[in-house]
Image (spheres, grey):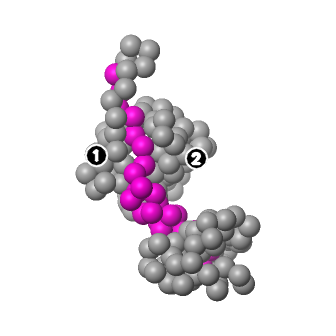
Amino acid sequence: MIKRVKTFLPDAKINAEEFREYGENFESEITRGISTLAILTIIRRSGTEGIYGYQLLKELEQDTKNMLIIEEGTLYPILKKLEKDGIVKSEKKVIGGRPRNYYMITQNGQQIYTHLIGFLSKFIEGIGSLLGLNVALPQIRYFYCPNCANQIEKNDNMKFCAICGLNVEEFQKR
């Protein structure tokens, strides 16, 4: 974000090298993991149809109101790693005369996704008050495993957490 900030006064704090460098490094650290989770979210919602890289980038920009911008040179290595790790799979399709790789989430990727999104949700909820944020996760659709934070759909009627094996049946009733 800081890289895209325009300055209007020569002595603006953001022009100071140490401020800008610290801010850019901090933003980079925070967005590294979130970028992967955001990419997985978009791939997941594309379902069995899948999504190709350029479309994914455009949806990411739109859905994050341009707060999370990933360059093509960053996206494709992330996609390759997710594919190598068995979290996504790709399929070549020719649509409109153009060959493209479409990415879909795997069953293993789906389980990893629910754990990661659960962890991030509970983490943000947990540190929210420390940062002066009011974060309250809606408990209507999801239940979060009290042991590992895995996000579980309430209508799954799952007896045991698929990630850590905790008997969550009793906790879901509360």
Q: Let me know if residue 141 is in the magenta part.
A: no
In the shown orientation, is residue 138 left or right of residue 48? right
Q: Earlier in the sequence, mark 1 or mark 2?
A: 2
In the rendered image, the vertical position of residue 20 relative to residue 73, given as above or below: below
Q: Is residue 20 left or right of residue 80?
A: right
Q: Which residue is mark 1?
A: 80
Label 2 Cα neighbours within 10 Å, binned few <14 / some 14-19 / many ≥20: few
Q: What amino acid type is highlighted by mark number 2?
A: Thr
Q: Position of residue 139 (x, y in %)?
A: 71, 71
Pick whichever, 155 or 103, lies toward us: 155
| Start-end of magenta stretch | 99-127
Q: Residue at x 37, y 49 (%)?
A: 88
Q: Which residue is found at the position 50% from the left and 64% from the top?
A: 114
- Total number of numbered discs in the rendering: 2
Which SS type dominates the magenta stretch? helix
Q: Secondary structure at mark 2?
A: loop
Which residue has dot 2 on it?
Answer: 64
